[in-house]
Image (cartoon, grey):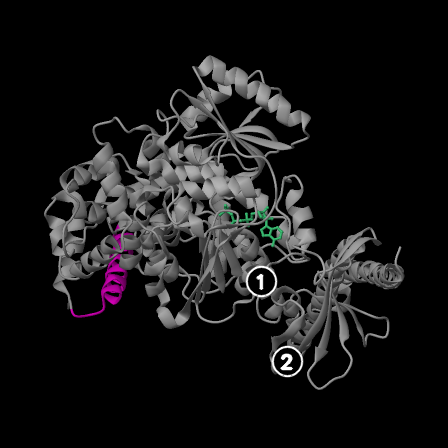
Amino acid sequence: MSLEFQQEQKRLDSVMETIEEEINRLEAETSRRKNEVVDIRKHFWDEVKVNTDTFDDYLETIIGLRQEAQALSVSQSSHRHASKRLSTLSRMQEVPYFGRIDFMEEGTSTPEQIYIGISTLRDSSGEDFLIYDWRAPVSSVYYDYQPGPAKYKTPEGVIEGILEKKWQYLTRGGVLQSMFDTSLTIGDEILQQVLGKGTDKQMHNIVATIQQEQNKIIRHDHGRLLIVHGAAGSGKTSAAMQRIAYLLYKYRERLNADQIILFSPNAMFSSYVSNVLPELGEENMQQVTFQEYLNRRLSKDFQVENPYEQLEYVLTATNTPSYRSRLASIRFKASTRFFEAIQLYRQSLELSGMLFKNITFRGKPIVTAQQIAERFYSHDTSLDFHNRLEKLKDWLIKNINEVQRIERTKSWVEEEIELLSDDEYHKARVYLAEKRGYKREAIADYEVEPEALAQLIVHQKLKPLRKRVRAFHFVDFKGTYKQLFADSLQINHWIEGETPEEWASICQATLEMLDEDKLFYEDATPFLLLKDLIQGFQTNSSIKHIVVDEAQDYSPFQFEFLRRLFPAASMTVLGDFNQAIFTHASETVDFNKLTSLYGSDQTEVINIARSYRSTKPIIEFTRRLVPNGEKIIPFERFGELPVLKQVADHVELHSSIASKVAGLRSLGLNSIAIICKSAEESISAYESLASINEIKLLKSNSIEYEQGVVVVPSYLSKGIEFDAVIIYDASEQVYGDESLRRVFYTACTRAMHYLQLYSVGKPSMFLQNVLREGFIQA
Ligand SMILES: Nc1ncnc2c1ncn2[C@@H]1O[C@H](COP(=O)(O)OP(=O)(O)OP(=O)(O)O)[C@@H](O)[C@H]1O
C-alpha cells in the first residue's frame, strides 16, 4: 500500500469521525426538537389565555396565539432540517466523497485540495470545508476539466486558476477501496465500473461520474427553455434528475421540490426514477403523466383514450378500413396549425357559434339554451369575451334568484317541509336562529318562521344549480367542439392551407366518438384548449420549473398547452427523435419548432452524442438502425456482439427463448426483458412462455419497474433498461414497415450488456445492412 494511499485513508478516517460526531449531535437535536414539538402541542392552550371581553383582551389573546404558533413552527422546521441533514449524513457514511481536485487559484502559490461529495461537510470549528457539495461552484471544475488551466463561475465572477490534479475515489463504508489519478489512468475507470454493473429496481444518481456535456445540462442557467437532444442511453434522464437537484441547491432560498413538475411517460418510469433525488438528500419533485392531467380534467365528462391505446391501434390495426384516416387525424390534430385553428375558431365565437345548455329546475327550463345564446349575442360584442361570459353568468344567477323567490310559495315546498326528519328540522332551525342573531343558549327561544324555512328549502335545492352555473356548466363545450367537425368545409374558415385528404372521414369518426361521450387521445388536448380558451385558462403560477422527459412523444400542440398552463415556469425538455414512436411525431426530426415557444433568445439547445447505457458492440449495432446514427458515439465498454437467431416457427421460437433465458440467468443477469412490438404480441408471447419460472407481463397500468424476467411491449420499455434484452420476433412479418423503425430502435437500445434477437422466418429489412456488415452475429 503506497504512502499516499495510507494518508488518504487517514484523512478518510478523520472525516468519518467528523460525520459521526455530527450525526450524534443531530440525533440529540432531533429528539430534543421532537419533544419540543410534542410539548408545545400538548400545552398549546395552557399558554394561551382566551379572553375576548374587551378589545385589549382580544388583542392579547391573538398575540398569545401567534407566539405559540410561531414557536411550534420554528421547532417543527428545525426538526425537519435536522432530520433531513441526518439522512444525508448517514448516506455520507457510505460514501463521504468521491473526487478531489487540487486547484491553484490565480494569485496564490499553493493548490487547495477540494474533496467533493453529495453534500458539504465542515470541520468541528465550522471554518474549514472537509467536503464540498458536488453542486458548489468550485466543484464544476471536477466535471469540466482535465489538469491544466481551468475556471469556474461564482456569483461574484469567474475564478481562474490551474487544475493541478484530479482524483477519483472508491470507498465503501468508510474504507478506501481504490483511488485513481485521472491524468494517469486511461479512460474513466469508475464510469467503467458503474456501467459494467447490473441494473437495479431503481435508477441511481450519477454525481460521481457526471460527464462534461452532461454537466452543461445540469448547470445550465439562463433563458426559459432548455432543449436537450441526445441519443438513447446518453444520460438525458440522469442529467434531468441531477439538474433538478442542482436547481434545488442553487435556489434553495426560493425554490422547493413542490414547485417542480416532472412529466414522465408512465407510472412505471415514475417509480424507476423516484429514488435519485432522495439519494442526493433532496425531496422528490412532483411527477405526473400527461394522461393523468387529462383524466383529472376530462374524465367526469368523457371516456378518454390513453396514449397507449392509441399506439396499440397504430401498431396492430393496420388492416382496418379506417386506419389511414385515423393516422392522418392523429398527425393533423397534433399540429400547431390545428392549435392556431382552434384559437381562430374561439375568436369567431365572439360573433356567433357558442352553444349553451338549458338550465332546468325540477324538470322545467329556467332559461333555455336558445335564450342564453340570444342574451350572449345581443349584448355589446366589442366587450372582452370573458367579461361577456361573466356578465352572462351574473344574469343566470339573477334568474335563479328570481326562481327562488317564486318557488318558495309552491306546494312542493310545503310537502318537503312535512317530509323533513327531526334531525333535518333541528339543523334548519339552528341555522335560521343563528342567522337571526340568536346566541347559543338563546336558540331554544327561536320560533321557526314558515316563510324563512320555505326559503331555506328552495335555496338548498338550487345550490347545485348555482354551483354548476358558476363553473360554466351552462356552456355546451362538447357541442361547441363538435361544430368544428359538423361539416367538413367548416374548418376552412380557420385554417390556412390544406386539410388532410381524409378530412371528411376524420370529421365523421370524431363526431361518432363525441356522441358516445368518448374522446380519442388526439382530441383530448384540443378539446381542453378550446374549453380553456372559452372559460379562461386554469393556469398554475406556483410551478417554477417543468421537466418534460421523453419529449419526442409530445405534440407541438401539447407543448403550447403546457406553456399556457404554467405561465411562471421555465422548462427543460429532453428527448430523442430516433425514439419518436407516436404517430404524431413520426415526421418530426428535431426540436427546432419548439424554439418558437419562448423565442430564440430564451432558448438553448444542447445535443449529446455519447451513449453510456449499452456496451460498445450493442451501440455499434443500434446506431446503424437509424438515420444519422453515425453521430452517436459509444462509450468504450466491451461486450458480446448482438446475436440474431432465425427460427422456423413459433414452437422453435418459444423453446429457444426459454433456453436462452435459462442461460442468461445462469450468468447472473438480474433483469431480462423479452420485448414485443405491441401489447397484443406481448400477451400471446407471455402465454406461450408461461413455463419460464417467475416470468411477468408488464402492462400499461403497471406501476413498478420489475426485476427478473419480463415480457413487455416496446413502447412501455421506453426510458428504462435491462441487463439483457431479447427481441421476441424481429422478422419481416412483424417489423416490415418503415414506420416501425423507431419502435424497433427503441426496443434494441434498452439492452445494457446483452442483446439477442429472434426472427420467425425472414429477418426484418432493418437488419439487412447490419447483417451484411457484421454488426450482428447470425
Ligand atoms: N455520467 C454517467 N455516469 C454513470 N452512469 C451514467 C452516466 N450517464 C448515463 N449513465 C447511465 O446510462 C444509462 C442511461 O442513462 P439515461 O437513462 O439517463 O439515458 P437516456 O438518455 O435518458 O436514455 P433513453 O433516451 O434511452 O431513455 C443509465 O443506466 C445511467 O445511469
Q: Nearer the viewer, residue 376 or 759?
A: 759
- Res 360 visible: no
Q: Which residue is mark 2?
A: 159
The prevailing secondary structure element of the residues shown in magenta is: helix
Image position, residue 259 (x, y; %):
53, 61
**Ligand 1: does it lie within 8 Å of the C-beta at label 1?**
no
Q: Nearer the viewer, residue 641 or 7?
A: 641
- Crowd class of label 2 (few under 14; some 14 to 19; many from 20; radius 10 Å): some
Left or right of 267 on screen, residue 27: right
Q: Nearer the viewer, residue 270 or 63?
A: 270
Write down the region rendered in magenta: 382-406
Q: Is residue 299 magenta?
A: no
CA separation, marks 2 and 1?
Answer: 18 Å
**Ligand 1: does it lie within 8 Å of the C-beta at label 2?**
no
Label 2 sits on a secondary structure element that is strand
Q: Which residue is mark 1?
A: 212
Left or right of 420 on screen, residue 438: right
Label 1 sits on a secondary structure element that is helix
| Quarter containing the N terminus | bottom right
Left or right of 14 on screen, residue 78: left
